[in-house]
Image: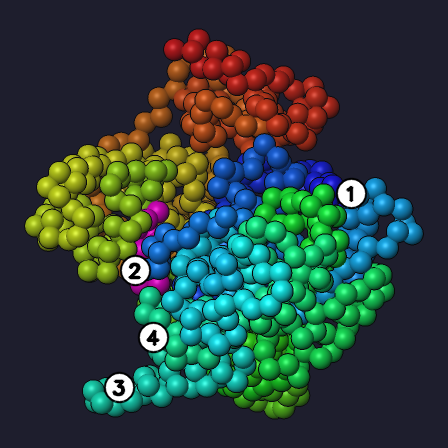
Amino acid sequence: MTSTETRSEIGPEIASAIGEAEAANELMRLARQIKRANRLYHAEDAPEISDAEYDALVRRNAELELAFPHLARSDSPSNQVGHEVAGSPLSKVTHEVRMMSLDNAFTDEEVAEFVGRVRRFLSLSAEEPVAMTAEDKIDGLSCSLRYEKGRLVRAATRGDGMVGEDVTANVAHIADVVQELKGEDVPEVFEVRGEVYMEKAAFAALNEALMAEARAHAEARGEVFDEGKVRQFANPRNAAAGSLRQKDAAVTAKRPLRFWAHGWGAASHVPGASQHEVIRRIESWGLPVSPQFRLCHTLEEVLEAYRVIRDGRPGLPFEIDGVVYKVDRLDWQQRLGFVAKAPRWAMAHKFPAERAETVLESIDVQVGRTGKLTPVGRLKPVLVGGVTVTNVTLHNRDEIARLGVRPGDRVVLQRAGDVIPQVVDNLTRAEERAAFHFPDHCPECGSEAVAEEGEVDVRCTGGLICPAQRTERLKHFVSRGALDIDGLGERTIDEFFARGWLESPADIFRLRKRRDEILALDGWKDKSVDNLLAAVENKRAPDAARLLFGLGIRHVGAVTARDLMKRFETLPALRVLAEQAHAKEGEEAAALGSEAYAELVSIDGIGPAVVEALGDFFHEEHNRQVWDDLLSEVAPPPYVVETVESVVAGKTVVFTGKLETMSRDEAKAQAERLGAKAAGSISAKTDLLVAGPGAGSKLKKAAELGIEVIDEAGWAEIVRSAG
Ligand code: ZN
């Protein structure tokens, strides 16, 4: 069947390339990223990633789900179209017939495969023609118009495909949307599906007007006008969406929106036996359809239609991003049906990259939430692939060196269906000018910014003091694996931080002084404030390893933190040695031959990267302050690892597959408590493999090496017998 056939070849390859835990993690991350992208794109009309990047995330998710079917999440993005409309000021509309999305093709071969799949699914011979319609895919906002007895009764956005938003009052201002269907064979009930869009010229004029308005506003108030802060629409699609989805339809009325029809949903009867008949019928009732809509009888005609539409693209007054094909015969569409959220009888053939030249005006360096310094090129605005691009990521220091770009260079920009806009060439490279100097200090906090050996990313070492990183660090500090403070969720941290109550982790322990202020906030009651403060007080004597992990020092994960604490027992003892082992500028720590360094790297599980990261951390004055401040509020008891007698003491254990009664972290902690070492991969040193369902390559390897294998129940038995 359709997608499985092409994907099954990818599946096992991925399955052997990455482990299950890694896949589960990646699926979790993808679900979150895709959900966020959906929300920004559909609900806020402010996407952070390109359509192409989005497509890549969705494809990766589908591949992983195919390779690890049992890991597919209940909130899998594969089952969702668009976004939920919760929180929208517009009222909700449940679609009688779900609004679908389309699978994508990027090459002629993929289109041929699509036709081949249709043939196989319908058991057609190779000679039997599969007629398909082709039309340009306009980059707009999907909309469903419900007509009853020919009158428009409701208009709704796609939303998540099941539930959209009511935009009936808004579409009343779109001239293309007729209020009444006139002509032959108008069904009792008929839902027209189509696209609301904005033409390129209207989009540019709207952005100009927004800028002028902001300027006038600032001037009237005597404020300095900052062009960079004016919220403009990124592309015509976002402008259309933002204009349609207005609670006040009077705003929509001022925006020149257009509409065209490309399909239908619920219908009391369908006026035709083929896609093209019905589309022509809809057109006869007074609704526009694509002027380039056509019927193709062979694959050659389909691909020719693609080339014609692609080549005519620059001359169109609106943005298109591909060509949509649909199997023409409706009885075949019926038989082909759907898979996941897309029909098997339709396909979007996306356009390839577009290029443009412009001037790189300056290079700014931004600090991300993980401390990574990212250079961003500020460009003389240029239209590429239908989008005005003003900024482009230059990724990292190496990429700048590779391109040899400096402010003032003339560069070639590329925007493709499958990548974000990027600089692909520097046309003025040969001009003699100084190279761009990549900062060695964080532009946000002034801390040293360093790239570790073998890494291209330069990172701010300011960690807890760097404003760009602070909230993320605080969230990590209270997370389950670290201090595990109940009631201090991400949103609470954001809010407290914004109010200046949480400058550093120590401030968490001073929140009790703000009891009345917290109580005055929305959503807080006596009981919830008391619960939060009690949860904080409960961590005054935290586990030292968790506290160390919570500080978010690079390379110091939960396991490393435990390894370190097993050796040092107290945090001050660790600090003394870490500071002694720190390399001075221009020196290799190892070359110092310091005893402290040697002692640290001799600890089981601790390597040079950890030692250097610790040294860098304590080298920063800010970090020392944060540390001292925190230890004035909390007092971790000396760290003791209580091990018990067990049959696995001194042995190396590996966990693999899905564990059903405990998390991987818990399993590892159990192993440690039993005096065993939990390793991540199988080697000759492994003594025991604990394998849950879905254990793949590791099981095979264990068999080859003759390693004892037990299941989760067997492990539980060992844990129990150890007492
Ligand atoms: Zn910084």
Within-10-Å neighbours for mark 1: few <14, some 14–19, many 20+: some
SS for callout 1 = helix
- Looking at the picture, how far across and down is residue 105, in whole percent? 71, 58
At x 80%, y 64%, the residue is 296
Sequence-first disc among 4 and 1: 1
Residue at position x 76%, y 59% from top?
A: 132
Q: Which residues are magenta?
A: 466-476
Q: Is 470 inside the magenta-drawn segment?
A: yes
C-alpha distance separating marks 4 and 1: 49 Å
- Percent across and percent down for residue 350 are 68, 65
Does the magenta portion include 710? no
- Residue where numbered disc 3 is placed: 218
The colour style of the image is rainbow
Q: CA distance from mark 4 to mark 3?
A: 24 Å
Q: Earlier in the sequence, mark 3 or mark 2?
A: 3
Give the label, 4 or 2, closer to the camera: 4
**What residue type is disc 2 on?**
Ile
Residue at the spot 54% in from the left edge and 81% down from the top edge = 200
- Give the mark nearest the N terminus, 4 or 2: 4
Residue at the extreme top: 721
Task: Answer whether labels 2 and 1 touch (C-beta < 8 Å).
Answer: no
Q: Which residue is mark 1?
A: 121
| Disc 3 to disc 1, C-alpha distance | 62 Å
